[in-house]
Amino acid sequence: MSPVNAAGRVHTSAGSLGTGASYPHSMASARQIHVGGVPIGGGAPVAVQTMTKTETANLPATMDQIRKVAEAGADIVRVAVPREKDVDALRTIVRESPIPIIADIHFNHTLALKSIEAGAHCIRLNPGNIGGPEKVGEVVDLARAKGTPMRIGVNSGSLPKHLHALERENPVEALVRAAEEFVELMHRLDFQDFKVSIKSTSVPNTIASNRLLAQRIDHPLHLGITEAGTKWSGSLKSAVGLGALLADGIGDTVRISLSTFHAEEEVKVAWEILKALKLRERGPVLIACPTCGRLQFDMDTVVSEIEERLRAYDDPIEVAVLGCAVNGIGEASHADFGITGAKDEGLIFSRGKALRKVRTEELVEVLFEEIDKYATRREIVVDDAASAAAGAEWLAEIEAENAGEMTPERMAALEKAKAQESGGGEDVLAAAGVEGADEEADGRRGLDEDASPTAGRRFTRA
């Protein structure tokens, strides 16, 4: 088999305002396939896919879910085809779907053949449970004739019998061996238009097996943690497993497998992983401090409302919410927009510069006024210089009051200043940020005490 052809790649669709940098990744797969119009592998952006939870033959329910996942950002969607009536529905689904369709086949190679004829953009096949090499060959022949790519692979629950002993001794090697055998079968059948997946319920095994497989083949890799779990635990396991691989530059398409009937939730988690790694951008990114004993306003409700309202925006802007002004806005000076609050007043800022000082209860509305102004003008403009100056002065006063507090940011600045001082660089206090010290609306969703208790904190929701 061909070795991995390492090369740089960048997965991004950066907007005009988004501040997220794009980072090159070594290319896990030199080959590229196309599922419908979506390129996978060969340097293409990591594709997001999911699987419908409905009975495929139930056309209204299936199409409704497909439209929802497409709107959430799915590039591709897979549907189960266990019966003839699902094949019948597949013809309509392929014709009406806004995104490419993968037909998921197990055990019955005839359904794979009929799904190809029905126009599926890709066939998911486990060569180990489809009836032997001859039947796999029949599917390959038709797929080649129709130009239909395939996804082949195994998971920890369906390894071939002859690998069960190896699985007990070395489950990672068993998974990789099974995948290699299927790849070799495809090569013997003179078929190259496929991607490969190896999944396990074990996060460490999934990571290790995909790293090993990426060294041995150059076909596109589909990543996932099989049967990951609930929205909470499954999202965490997927983020750890897929995040580790994607950070290594391994993986060309991902599916988050959650125990939820809302397939769009899987898509949202996938996008958050890709956005966190700066591999792709889609919509705003919200960053928020974890809060502490300094907090003097109802930041919990503010963050919740901002997150909800940001769903309506497409620009990849970064929005920051800081619970206090002790650190100024230094920790979020890179954010396109943000707020930092206190007991009665707060500051709206943009890229480290004050925009407006407003009352705490107006923070969210004014923040979105500034965001909407950008959306209209395509640039950030300070309309009220006096208000911006007042905001900067307010911030400086609070910083002066807390100048002695050794925050992580201030410690880092002091360390930098000390290094510069030894080399005759900037003034220590200036570098440490001390110089600056010398100078419920309608429709708002509140949080109750059970959701986010205020007991023991410096504010109430009264």
Image (tube, rainbow, N blue to C red):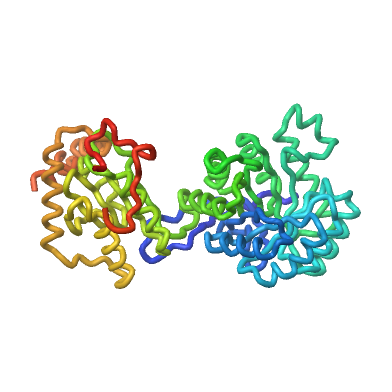
Q: Quadrant of the C terminus?
A: top left
Q: Position of residue 382 (x, y in %)?
A: 19, 65
**Residue at image x 39%, y 55%?**
308
Residue 334 falls left or right of residue 60: left
**Residue at image x 12%, y 49%?**
394
Q: Position of residue 377 (x, y in %)?
A: 29, 72
Q: Position of residue 179 (x, y in %)?
A: 75, 45
Q: Position of residue 176 (x, y in %)?
A: 73, 40
Can residue 311 be seen here? The reply is yes
Q: How many marks?
A: 0
**Residue at image x 22%, y 47%?**
341
**Residue at image x 80%, y 59%?**
191
* Quarter assignment of residue 49: bottom right
Q: Nearer the viewer, residue 68 or 1?
A: 68
Residue at the farthest left position:
438
Q: Is residue 154 above or below residue 33?
A: above
